[in-house]
Amino acid sequence: MVDAPNPQSGEQGKPPKSDWEAKPKPHWVEVSTLIILAIIGFFQICIYFKQASIMQTQADIARSQLEITKRQVAPRMVMDNLEDADQNLTKWSFTPQWVNKGEFDAQNFRNWENIDFFFRGTASNFDFLAPAGVESSAVPTVPGGEYIAQRTLTIPRAWAQQSFDGQGDVVAWGYIKWNDPPPNAQEHSRHWCFLLVFEMSKGDLAMKLPRYYQPRCNKAD
């Protein structure tokens, strides 16, 4: 006959015993894992920034090459020469001439020019950047590689004599303006000013080739 369980017994309700016991992992294992993960993450970040730097460098190179190409093909007006024609006993003249060194057409080309005699000391205070007249009629286009001339300027013999005698200077000045083709259509301008010098040759006055007068009035915008 089986005895009934004793409600007062301390063994009542206890779970069965097991031979397995949970043991905590050593602390150094967790630390090592974190260090390895940190090192891997650090190298991944370094690789990312290295790749980003390479991509940025490539983008900068591509952008620079694009700008160089734009400058090479953009319309670019350059002084080609100064024509000194019609030298005689009463007058001298020259014609500023320009050439489009770019591949694209220069749009809406316009210009202005003037010439005058300045007694010694007066030209240094003159504003050669401000036009004192009306611009010439605009030329619709100046194709790449083509030439265009400004108005021919003449020098009276009296100015030449005064310049040769040291009383002052004969100065020619002006500017040109043009636009890039659409859609940009950016405006460009170039100011110029020349000193006209005279010398005695074969018993009479003769004009030498003009030379640049001052940096402040020979500049491009």
Image (cartoon, rainbow, N blue to C red):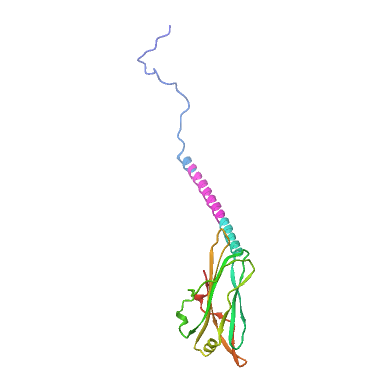
Magenta stretch containing residue 117, yes or no?
A: no
Which residue is depicted at the point 48% across and 43% down? 34
Q: Is the N terminus in the top left, top right, bottom left or bottom right quadrant? A: top left
> As rendered, which of 56 and 132 lies closer to the eye?
132
Q: Is residue 147 left or right of residue 218?
A: right
- Relative placement, left or right, of 116 versus 88 is left
Pinpoint residue 221: horizontal percent, then vertical percent: 51, 68
Most distant residue in the right direction: 145
- Relative to the observer, which residue lies in front, 69 or 116? 116
- Magenta segment, which residues? 33-56
| SS majority, magenta | helix
Please determine whether, in this image, residue 1 is positioned above or below residue 136.
Answer: above
- Image position, residue 50 (x, y; %): 54, 53
Determine whether 36 is above or below 103 in the image.
above
In the foreground, 33 or 138? 138
Q: Is residue 219 visible?
A: yes
Q: Position of residue 212 (x, y in %)?
A: 55, 79
Residue sitting at 51 percent across and 46 percent down? 41
